[in-house]
Every structure is written in structure tokens, then in C-alpha cells.
Amino acid sequence: MRIDYHQLIKIPVETESGVGLGRVIGLELDTEKQAVMKYIVAQSKFFAEKLFISPSQIVRITAEKIVVEDAVGAEKQTTMVAERFSAAEAPTTNAEING
């Protein structure tokens, strides 16, 4: 299957277990190898937090979506939890995180 840039941009990205991570907003290319190095994913074009996904983390690409390993979703959730707390108030147990 071939997909052009305009189809790829805005395509939804989700984990194997169905967790939505956002949409593709850009690519990082290696110009010498002429290859995609990273897919840049965000909740929206203007959302500050971006997720950089390497081709090795992708399970499959279809015309409707990109599916990535579940570990990618776990990395994003860990980052979001860490950003919610300053170093002084970082939680030390799951109860503190979820509470």
C-alpha cells in the first residue's frame, strides 16, 4: 500500500489495545537515507505535548489509522503523570497518582 503525505497527516494513531494517542502532525526524515525516522503525533496541531514514534514502534499502517505498540501509550501516560506534579510534590505510590 502507498499513502501520500496529505493522507498521512491527520491520520489517527492508537495503541494495539485501542488507546488513542492523537494524530500525525509531521515527520522527521533522514535525507541521506530518504527514510522516515520519526512520526510526530499530538492531540491537536497546537497541543504542546508531542509524541515522537519511530518506525520500529509501529505495528501497522492502514489508510484509516496507525497502530503502535502498547508500550508507546504507557510511555505517554507516564510522561503526563510526571508533568502533572513538580519534583517536590511527585507521588510515591499508585494511590497518590490515582487519588
Image (spheres, grey):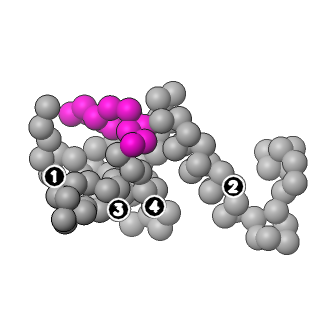
Q: Earlier in the sequence, mark 3 or mark 1?
A: 1
Residue that carries the numbered disc 3 in the rendered image: 45
**Disc 3 residue type (three-letter):** Lys
The residue located at (12%, 47%) in the rendering is 4
Q: Earlier in the sequence, mark 4 or mark 3?
A: 3
Q: What's the mark number on residue 81?
A: 2
Q: At numbered mark 3, what does the secondary structure look like: helix, strand or loop?
A: loop
**Disc 1 residue type (three-letter):** Tyr
The residue located at (87%, 48%) in the rendering is 93
**Disc 2 residue type (three-letter):** Val
Residue that carries the numbered disc 1 in the rendered image: 5
For the record, the magenta segment spans 56-68
Q: At numbered mark 2, what does the secondary structure look like: helix, strand or loop?
A: helix
Q: At numbered mark 1, what does the secondary structure look like: helix, strand or loop?
A: helix
In reply to whether residue 80 is colored magenta, the answer given is: no
Q: Give residue 56's quadrant in the image.
A: top left
Instruction: Using a 10 Å C-alpha cutoff, classify the residue at mark 4 as few (fewer than 14 neighbours), some (14 to 19) or many (20 or more).
Output: some
Residue that carries the numbered disc 4 in the rendered image: 50
Q: At numbered mark 4, what does the secondary structure look like: helix, strand or loop?
A: loop
Q: Nearer the viewer, residue 98 or 50?
A: 50
Q: Earlier in the sequence, mark 2 or mark 1?
A: 1
Q: Are marks 4 and 3 in contact (CB under 8 Å)?
A: no
**Disc 4 residue type (three-letter):** Lys
Q: Could you tell me how far apart the alpha carbons at marks 4 and 1 are, in whole angstroms?
A: 19 Å
